[in-house]
């Protein structure tokens, strides 16, 4: 395993004090966190945290109120005036490219009496006009017009009443994140070592990746953490939950990864993220299903390029709620595999309730015909109508229902997350892994999931988010 002494900056892993400057957690939340701490050290997870009002409210403040949260991809708003409605936690924002070409994340509330300005999910507009009394704002957020201004507001300084905006917005290779905390680590620091893995997905395509169409969105009676946990690296479920997909020939089992096969697989995590890389034998170049002419080695190290070449499927999660899947798949058993990259976000809506968002990305320089085909494959696999997607949500709903019960709370029902712990299975840490983070020598392990829940626990405790490496949980 890499250590800090090896030059791998895993950040603060010690007993950190609560540093948020916020209200302390309620006694009930503290009690649940205490239980969570003791349980996770033993590879157990109290299920109540998947559906509990007080935990949910604390998550909104301690996690979504402090973390870098994904708001969109820059190719969704390529032209000045392009905008899309987005959320950080439950807070509504307008993700917009202003006339000055700058990307902003504006709080979607009129500075007069608070009505929301953005009624369409996506569009292009030079101004946002409030539907209540008609105050009008430029797409830069500046207040530009007030009805009956001379009589009603002659003495008002419009410079004081522009739209509020997220205090920190940063763009990492097209992925735009925002934080509603004024201070904290930069996005680059937050992503930390995980950038190395993210780059494999973002830099493998010539000309970069671009979003096709609008994100799909759907509600589910599942907790947002179910999606984040699963995409962290739950390879174990693939051969069971998705069995029917493989049986009808819509997926390639060797690529999509039934757990426990002999094909070499590594599961690793680093700083703010965790990922599962399902690797083929070294001489079987697959590049996530992309034709060779769409890939490039220009921006990747030899090792990163080698990984992309050998990888037919990868999932990952960046704390807290952005996941991805890069997959070679098909929507027709008679057709060859095509690659696509899907970003997915698990939006917290309520305790045990989320809204899933899913973006489809493809190499920007791919042909229009390829893009259309890859989009169709993405819809057939990971979308509300996708076969893999439906399998996952069918089981996540049940977790939230049980988690919200009086029984689970009174009896402190805990789930098993022990796979990969010493003495439990055969997976071992791969000491020779030559990428950042910790890797296992097969995918029958849940250290990646325990890392996600360890980061959740630390964030809920008020400790620094990102650059955390709770080695005590792996
Ligand atoms: S609330 Fe927007 S103009 Fe009054
Ligand atoms: Fe799945």
Image (cartoon, rainbow, N blue to C red):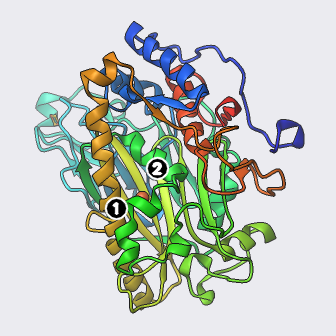
Q: Residue furthest right?
A: 5
Residue 389 has which mark? 1
Q: Is residue 240 left or right of residue 268?
A: left
Q: Which residue is mark 2?
A: 230
Q: Quadrant of ligand 2?
A: bottom left
Identify the image quadrant of the C terminus.
Answer: top right
Find out whether the residues at labels 1 and 2 contact each other: C-beta distance under 8 Å: no
Closer to the camera in the image, 373 or 74: 373
Confirm whether residue 53 shows in the render: yes
Q: Is residue 16 left or right of residue 302?
A: left
Identify the image quadrant of the N terminus.
Answer: top right
Q: Is mark 2 within 8 Å of ligand 2?
A: yes
Please state the horizontal and vertical placement of residue 357, each as a whole percent of the image: 34, 55
Q: Is mark 1 within 8 Å of ligand 2?
A: yes
Q: Quadrant of residue 387?
A: bottom left
Query: Under tag 1, what secondary structure?
Result: helix
């Amino acid at each position: 395993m890499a250590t800090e002494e090896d030059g791998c900056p895993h950040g603060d892993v010690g007993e950190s004090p609560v540093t948020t400057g916020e209200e302390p957690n309620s006694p009930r939340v503290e009690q649940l966190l205490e239980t969570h701490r003791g349980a996770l050290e033993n590879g157990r997870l109290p299920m109540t945290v998947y559906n509990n009002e007080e935990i949910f409210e604390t998550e909104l403040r301690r996690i979504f109120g402090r973390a870098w949260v994904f708001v969109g991809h820059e190719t969704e708003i390529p032209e000045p005036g392009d905008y899309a409605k987005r959320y950080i936690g439950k807070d509504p924002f307008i993700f917009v490219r202003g006339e000055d070409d700058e990307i902003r994340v504006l709080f979607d509330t009129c500075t007069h009496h608070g009505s929301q300005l953005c009624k369409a999910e996506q569009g292009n507009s030079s101004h946002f006009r409030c539907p209540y009394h008609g105050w009008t704002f430029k797409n830069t957020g500046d207040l530009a017009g007030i009805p009956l201004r001379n009589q009603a507001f002659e003495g008002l300084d419009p410079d004081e009443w522009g739209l509020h905006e997220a205090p920190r917005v940063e763009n990492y290779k097209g992925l735009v994140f925002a934080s509603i905390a004024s201070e904290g680590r930069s996005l680059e620091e937050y992503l930390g070592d995980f950038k190395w893995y993210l780059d494999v997905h973002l830099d493998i395509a010539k000309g970069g990746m671009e979003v096709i169409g609008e994100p799909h969105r759907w509600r589910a009676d599942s907790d947002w953490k179910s999606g984040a946990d699963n995409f962290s690296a739950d390879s174990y479920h693939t051969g069971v939950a998705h069995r029917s997909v493989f049986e009808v020939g819509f997926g390639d089992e060797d690529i999509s990864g039934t757990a426990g096969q002999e094909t070499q697989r590594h599961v690793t995590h680093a700083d703010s993220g965790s990922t599962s890389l399902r690797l083929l034998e070294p001489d079987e170049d697959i590049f996530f299903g992309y034709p060779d002419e769409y890939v490039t080695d220009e921006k990747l190290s030899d090792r990163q390029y080698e990984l992309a070449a050998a990888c037919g499927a990868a999932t990952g999660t960046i704390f807290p709620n952005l996941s991805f899947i890069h997959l070679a798949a098909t929507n027709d058993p008679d057709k060859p595999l095509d690659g696509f990259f899907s970003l997915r976000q698990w939006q917290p809506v309520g305790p045990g309730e989320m809204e899933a968002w899913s973006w489809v990305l493809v190499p920007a320089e791919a042909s229009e015909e390829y893009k259309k085909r890859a989009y169709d494959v993405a819809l057939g696999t990971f979308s509300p109508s996708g076969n893999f997607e439906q399998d996952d949500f069918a089981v996540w709903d049940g977790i939230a229902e049980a988690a919200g019960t009086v029984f689970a709370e009174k009896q402190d029902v805990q789930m098993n997350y022990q796979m990969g712990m010493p003495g439990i299975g055969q997976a071992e840490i791969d000491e020779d892994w030559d990428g950042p983070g910790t890797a296992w020598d097969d995918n029958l392990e849940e250290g990646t999931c325990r890392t996600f829940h360890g980061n959740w626990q630390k964030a809920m405790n008020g400790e620094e988010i990102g650059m955390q490496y709770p080695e005590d949980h792996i």
